[in-house]
């Protein structure tokens, strides 16, 4: 018998080939599953809310897995943080309802992309964690481009080529540029029901070309009408991308339901 838990995982993606297990290279999934096997005494598969590319970071990646009944959320979090490598850390652990799945149960996912526009972005303390562009961008043009992406569209032009998908529709509930503190540059915030492979990086790469005056704003709408990515700008580098959070239905949090029942009983 087991219970399902949701770990909120942070990691520095610099030394990883991404979340997903790969034939070669160090993946976050392998590191997490190695620790779970050590704790539970058997192989345990962990599922993440999204697949991240090599070099991409996470501030709040949802990761689900089953755990024996002898474990609880607090002891699981302590044990994982004691054994995970130093570039990974579990910030929270929640007990979930049976059948919960970090990817399949997600209603939405949120990413952030950081760009450094001043010369300080070349610092070794910043370069691995943002796009060290080092050039000024037209903020008004970026914001106008981001606004055009809101709502539901076919994002075929902003997806990496690969296995054909049933459809390329995504619904963006958030798409906006924000100035970073200290005049360091800008951050792009985006939330959607689903994302395609390389989608955020391709969106950012194309919008930056608009912000640099390399292509007109009208190209954004034109690309949304295309059935291929032949005229899309190259994807932004992975270092600036962060998986921020996944959203799940409130009723899937078993610990929250238990607290509600206890409060109702005590009341």
Image (cartoon, rainbow, N blue to C red):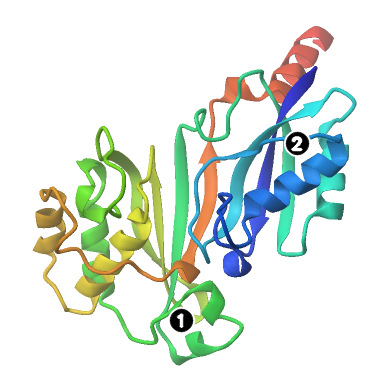
Residue placed under numbered mark 1 in the picture: 183
SS category of the residue bearing label 2? loop
Residue 27, quarter of picture:
bottom right
Drawn side of residue 259 relative to residue 223, left or right? right
Drawn side of residue 85 relative to residue 186, left or right? right
Q: Nearer the viewer, mark 2 or mark 1?
A: 2
Q: Which mark is residue 43?
A: 2
The picture places residue 221, in percent across and down from the top left corner, at 12, 54
The picture places residue 112, in percent across and down from the top left corner, at 46, 59
Check the image and name the residue furthest to the bottom.
119
Check the image and name the residue furthest to the top.
265
SS category of the residue bearing label 1? helix
Q: Which mark is residue 129?
A: none
Residue 65 vertical placement versus 142 (above, below):
above
Q: Residue at x 48, y 58 (%)?
A: 53
Q: Residue at x 66, y 45 (%)?
A: 8
User: What is the C-alpha distance between the residues marked 2 and 1?
Assistant: 47 Å
**Residue in front for this viewpoint, 43 or 62:** 43
Tell how many labels.
2
Q: Residues within 10 Å of mark 1 (few under 14, many from 20)?
A: few
Q: Residues within 10 Å of mark 2 (few under 14, many from 20)?
A: few
The picture places residue 195, in percent across and down from the top left corner, at 37, 45
Reading the chain from its start, which is encountered first: label 2 or label 1?
A: 2
Q: Residue at x 27, y 63 (%)?
A: 143
């Amino acid at each position: 018998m087991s219970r399902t838990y949701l770990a909120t995982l942070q990691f520095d993606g610099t030394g990883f080939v991404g979340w997903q297990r790969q034939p070669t290279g160090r993946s976050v999934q392998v590191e997490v599953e190695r620790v779970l096997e050590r704790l539970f005494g058997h192989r345990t598969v962990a599922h993440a809310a999204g697949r991240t590319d090599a070099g991409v970071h996470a501030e709040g990646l949802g990761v689900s897995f089953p755990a024996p009944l002898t474990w609880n959320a607090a002891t699981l979090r302590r044990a994982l943080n004691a054994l995970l490598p130093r570039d990974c850390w579990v910030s929270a652990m929640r007990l979930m309802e049976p059948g919960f799945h970090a990817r399949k149960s997600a209603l939405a996912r949120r990413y952030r992309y950081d760009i450094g526009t001043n010369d300080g972005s070349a610092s070794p303390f910043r370069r691995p964690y943002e796009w060290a562009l080092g050039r000024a961008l037209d903020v008004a043009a970026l914001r106008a481009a981001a606004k055009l992406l809101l709502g539901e569209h076919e994002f075929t032009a902003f997806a990496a080529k690969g296995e054909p998908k049933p459809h390329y529709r995504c619904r963006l509930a958030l798409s906006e540029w924000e100035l970073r503190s200290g005049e360091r540059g800008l951050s792009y915030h985006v939330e959607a029901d689903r994302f395609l492979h390389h989608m955020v990086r391709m969106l950012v790469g194309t919008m930056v070309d608009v912000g640099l005056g390399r292509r007109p704003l009208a190209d954004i709408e034109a690309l949304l009408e295309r059935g291929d990515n032949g005229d899309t700008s190259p994807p932004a580098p992975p270092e600036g991308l962060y998986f921020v959070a996944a959203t799940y239905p409130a009723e899937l949090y078993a610990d929250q339901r238990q607290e509600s029942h206890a409060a109702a009983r005590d009341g």
